[in-house]
Amino acid sequence: MDLLRRWIRLMAAAVLLCCVLLPGAWAAEGETGSATILFTHDLHSSFLPRKDGSGGTTGGYARLASALKEERAAHPGALTVDGGDFSVGSLIQALYTTQAAELRTMGAMGYDAVTVGNHEFDGTGSGFGEMLTAARRSGDVTPALLLANYRPEEDSLDLQRAMAAYGVEESLLLERGGVTYGIFGLMGRDAHACAPTSGFVLEDPVRAARRCVERLEEQGAEVIVCLSHGGTSPDGTSEDEELARAVEGIDLIVSGHTHTALEEPILAGETYIVSAGEYGKNLGSVTLSWNEAGEKTLTDYRLIPLDGTWESDPEIAALIEGWKGQVSSGYLAPYGLTYDQRLTRLSFDLPAPESGVQSGSALGELTADAYLWAAEHLAGVEPGTPTVAVTADGVLRAPLYAGELTTSMAFDVLSMGVGEAGSAGFPLVSCYLTGKELRAVAEVDASVTPLMPAAQLYTAGMSYSFNTHRVPFNRVTGVWLTGEKTAAQAEKHTETETWKNELENDRLYRVVTGMYSAQMLDTVKDRSFGLLSIVPKDEHGEPVTDFSQRILRDRNGNEIKEWYALAAYLRSFGERGVPNDYALSGGDGRKQVSHSWSPGQLLGHLNWIGFAALALLALAAAAVVLLVRWAVRSRRRGRRGGGYRRRRLF
């Protein structure tokens, strides 16, 4: 009996010892380290929360700061990084070149490293350099700026000096929480194409990434993180997925540019790709663990919504209020406006256009109407001058939701670019196009938009119709000049409140649009494979080569910004509020999009492209008929020959 008791005690002790020692042994054989990376991208100067369309708000740096503190408390030593496009998207961007508000606020929130996106160059390469200089001279703590494959042109000496003084590097080795991180930054190919005034030269991202990975591995990096402004796509053919498959050794890609929010990471090769969405709607958190062999596995991934449940960090909130005050006293003062000034009210939502869906847009039409209104009321264009206003999907950056509309909300809609003097916001410009070219503008909307959704257009002073099933570059079925009736016109057109005139091919018509859209007009030939041509002209019919000479200015000589045209137009509605004419989100019918297969719609109004396509279709049909007839005859001959041979055999 004593012997049995001894055996039982011995077995119990062995079991207890296993319970104590085995987990440690398993950990030694399994997980030997872990790293948590907190990340954002495409913040676009979203210092303050934005309305979310459901009565709440989302984002804001004071909330982001609170979330970062909570996550760092749970994960001491966590890395904090950003994937680019941290600027351009709110009024505080007006301080970009003079105060570097974005980088300084990110420094205050504890970001370790960031890379750049295309919008960091909206103010050209020199504006980017001025921002770096302002950040350095402030004396504030700012994050490391990493950029491995994007360099200024050789003659940009001032910009090179500014980058060197700030300490811009290709890569960074950083020890945090016992983990040695290797971090590098990349600019994507499409992002580079979206920054035509950067003055930078792009190196192949794959080649630059291989160089950085090799260097960081030699330096002893345990976790290699790429901050890429390349983006992802649903079909798996995106730049960052191609990068991950082409370059071994990258453990994590923080992917910006495409404003994607990935609910689960993409695993491409052995690389995890993560994205948290735009405007600071979420804070991303990813944890990787590894074993003795260095094999990494995903152990945690979350997108943390930055909604109204978060308290604002008081330090960051106070910093933002200071930035707002500087914007009101400086940038907005010449306009007689302040940051939160009420302009009017809105009793319905004006959503941003749905990307890739060809239709009208009340927000786009409101914006185009604002351009037309500003040309007459702010720039002093003579009333009655036939004028067409054009805006594009790609410049409409935010919706307008029901409620009070303020200065900052109007700016958010049209926040891109800088003017001739380097101040925030693209200015309005004017040029002239022939009636034939205005038809080509409508055709750009009809035929180029499926290939390039940002090219979808919205107009004022002009209406048009097209059918999406017609031959590309011959989809437009009608274009009209429209406007409010004058007394003389009212006598002839008593049945409607507007008049319509067919465009005259060779007549010059005045066009008002934003600087960016105007600069894109002369690229239409390339975008349409040489089938369409639009050449902006002056009032004498001479080609415009310098749009800085075509900027619309008010009576005091100030540039009329796109956003200010919208703000002033909204302000003109006063207490009445935005008219219900804009209540239909799909627009008021000035752009008529048909999806009919009716032969009348498909075959009417053919141009030479349509006739050529019809001729090719007829030739193809004839070829098919001839081929079928030849096949039938061959088969018949074969049968006759076969019967003859059978008779000989028998």
Image (cartoon, helix red, strand yellow):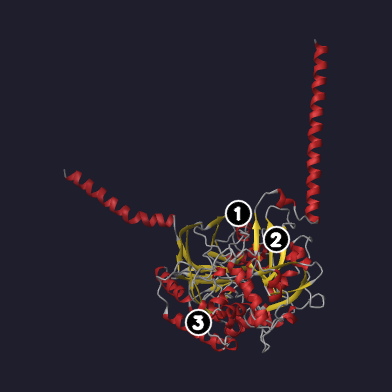
Q: Is residue 68 above or below residue 136?
A: above
Find disc 2 in the rendering and name its residue: 448
Residue 393 percent location from the top left of the image: 63, 67
Q: Earlier in the sequence, mark 1 or mark 2?
A: 1
Q: Mark 3 packing: few (<14 Cα in 10 Å), some, or many (20+)?
A: few
Q: Secondary structure at mark 1?
A: loop
**Would you say residue 440 is visible in this rendering?**
yes
In the image, what residue type sits under mark 2?
Val
Find disc 3 in the rendering and name its residue: 340
Q: Mark 1 packing: few (<14 Cα in 10 Å), some, or many (20+)?
A: few
Q: Which mark is residue 235?
A: 1
Q: Quadrant of residue 504?
A: bottom right
Q: Residue at x 68, y 49 (%)?
A: 598
In the image, what residue type sits under mark 1?
Asp
In the image, what residue type sits under mark 3?
Asp
Give the foreground label among 1 and 2.
2
Residue 351 percent location from the top left of the image: 54, 66
Q: Residue at x 78, y 49 (%)?
A: 614
